[in-house]
């Protein structure tokens, strides 16, 4: 079983920055060989893919965050990061990490990001 713990969210003004972390752990688990991603869910909307990173470090971004967000991974720490710059009010959401492709059983509690205008 895999546990994912997201941290780093908070309240920030538009134009500000936050860095999210996702620490993964589990007894049957191979972090290094898996793709990972950040997802988000805004109030009243479906959960959406924000940025995935492959096992060999290739990254992809939703058009809405391209040029502002950066996903990275630290295989030694079993951790995935999301650096978010130039935040906008429309980035307000609960942010989750999960495998990519996602695994239903992996969803954690997420971390709330609120961007004020």
Image (spheres, grey):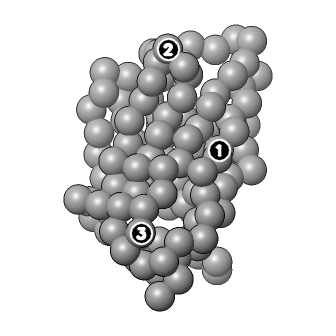
Which residue is farthest bottom? 117
Question: Of the numbered discs in the image, which one, if any, rests on residue 16?
Answer: 3
Instruction: Give yes or no for contact between labels 3 and 2 (Cβ–Cβ under 8 Å).
Output: no
Mark earlier in primary sequence (1, 2) = 1
Q: Secondary structure at mark 3?
A: loop
Where residue 78 appears, as percent x and y from the top left, is: 55, 22
Instruction: Give yes or no for contact between labels 1 and 2 (Cβ–Cβ under 8 Å).
Output: no
Count numbered badges in the picture.
3
How many C-alpha atoms fall within 10 Å of the one at disc 3: few (<14), some, or many (≥20)?
some
Give the answer, above or below, for where 57 lies relative to 67: above
Where residue 57 appears, as percent x and y from the top left, is: 30, 27
State the quadrant of the N terminus.
top right
Mark earlier in primary sequence (1, 3) = 1
Left or right of 8? Residue 53 is left
- Residue 72 picture quarter: top left
Residues 70 and 34: in front is 70
Q: Secondary structure at mark 2?
A: helix
Where residue 5 appears, as percent x and y from the top left, is: 69, 39
Residue annotated with mark 1 = 6
Which residue occupies 54% across, 20% down? 77
Q: Secondary structure at mark 1?
A: strand
Residue annotated with mark 2 = 76
Which residue occupies 74% across, 50% down? 109
Question: Of the numbered discs in the image, which one, if any, rests on residue 22?
Answer: none
Does the image show residue 79?
yes
Give the answer, above or below, for where 17 lies relative to 13: above
Tell me how far mark 1 sits from mark 2, CA to CA.
Answer: 17 Å
């Amino acid at each position: 079983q895999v546990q994912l713990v997201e941290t780093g969210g908070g309240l920030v003004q538009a134009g500000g920055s936050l860095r999210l972390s996702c620490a993964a752990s589990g007894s049957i688990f191979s972090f290094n060989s898996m793709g990972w991603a950040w997802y988000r869910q805004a109030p009243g909307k479906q959960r959406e893919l924000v940025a995935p990173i492959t096992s060999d470090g290739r990254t992809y971004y939703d058009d809405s965050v391209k040029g502002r967000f950066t996903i990275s991974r630290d295989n030694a720490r079993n951790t995935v990061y999301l650096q978010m710059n130039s935040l906008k009010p429309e980035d307000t959401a609960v942010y989750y990490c999960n495998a990519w492709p996602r695994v239903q059983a992996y969803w954690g509690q997420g971390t709330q990001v609120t961007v004020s205008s």
